[in-house]
Amino acid sequence: MGTRAGRSDRGGRGREIDRLELIIDMPRGTDSVGVTGSGERNLKLIREALGVAVSSRDGEILVRGDEPAIGVARRVLEEVSKRAKAGRPVSREEMLDLIAAESVRTRRDRMGGRQAWDGRLRVYAAGQPVEPKTDNQRLYLDAIRDHDLTFAFGPAGTGKTYLAVAAAVHLLREGAASRVILCRPAVEAGEKLGFLPGGLEEKVNPYLRPLLDALHDMMDFRDLKRFLESDIVEVVPLAFMRGRTLNGAVIILDEAQNTTKGQMKMFLTRMGHGSKMIVTGDTTQIDLPDPAQSGLIDAVRRLRRVAGVATVALSGEDVVRHRLVQRIVEAYGAEEEHRAYRESVERALSEMGDEDRNGAVSPGEI
């Protein structure tokens, strides 16, 4: 595949913008479709993901844009061309993975080893910067920055999901990640999916709504719509992750307490090169038939001492919603502690002989 590069000074409204123009010679015959994809699908994915202008005509591909993006497009198309010549055209998912991996590699090379994250998120909601409100939230963001896999668990309102999405949006904007994948298990919390209206997509949408709400807070509607349409941002049920390998992505699993051990293993093994995973959940709200089978609890137990893995525990002190939420969390927490104490007393009494029960406190008196 031959290439020819040149400078293109074409600015709008009297401005001159230094942009690179790249001409790539396509292979002949059916191999050309293997490069461009059916209906020029591959070129459309490059255009949407990298923000470059791409067109195909007369056996050539013309790519115009900023130099880093042009470099990524060139390397991706060269790899796609090699596979096409070998009779292995790329799928949509493989194309996205190639773009993601090359984008992250380019970003890291240009940064010369510098962090894409100096401790402050370049993310805003309602005009205000998104930032940690408590010490534990600060530790949480540091863990995401410094580790490839982070587990975070705690009660409602502690920012587990919101800060994870904010970190993902930041890394996407900084070019340290080229895709964001947000997923949840579709587990009923007392309700039945079969009674919800519509097909599968409509049935699982309520489970994914909190992730979309966080994205809408932090991203311009038009950008988010474009990213969702081009799969730069995906919001999917956990079941749809099977069989995938995700490179150069930030992958968030929310409500992870409702995964089984098998589902958690499946999810964690989706991690590809240059990716980060963030797993969040509330271990007091497990909706599985057998709470002992929670994949989140099992994974934290197995992986807590594995290098590259961080575990962050958030508590009622980290609740940043309405002040009543913290009081509600504390009230339910106190009730759980009270129930556990009563059960321990009941077990102790059941193990006593009659002669030992004199003077003992009955569970009903607690």
Image (cartoon, grey):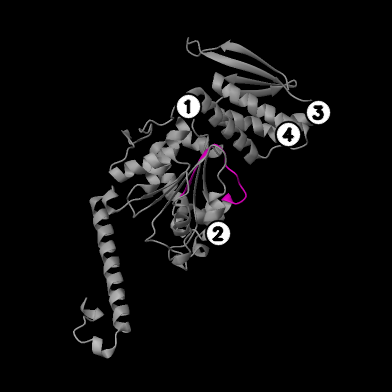
Residue with the mark numbered 4:
83
- Proximity of marks 1 and 3: CB atoms separated by less than 8 Å: no
- In which quadrant is the C terminus drawn? bottom left
Front one among 338 and 169: 338
Q: Residue furthest left?
A: 359
Question: Is residue 275 magenta-colored?
Answer: no
Q: Residues within 10 Å of mark 1 (few under 14, many from 20)?
A: few
Mark 1 or mark 3, which has the lower sequence index?
Answer: 3
Q: CA distance from mark 4 to mark 2?
A: 34 Å
Disc number placed over residue 29 in the picture, else none: 3
Question: Is residue 248 magenta-colored?
Answer: yes
Residue with the mark numbered 1:
113
Which range of residues does the magenta coloring cover? 241-253
Q: Residues within 10 Å of mark 4 (few under 14, many from 20)?
A: some
Give me the residue at 67% from left, 18% from top: 23
Residue 150 visible in the snapshot: yes
**What residue type is disc 2 on?**
Gly
Q: CA distance from mark 2 to mark 3?
A: 45 Å
Q: CA distance from mark 4 to mark 3?
A: 15 Å
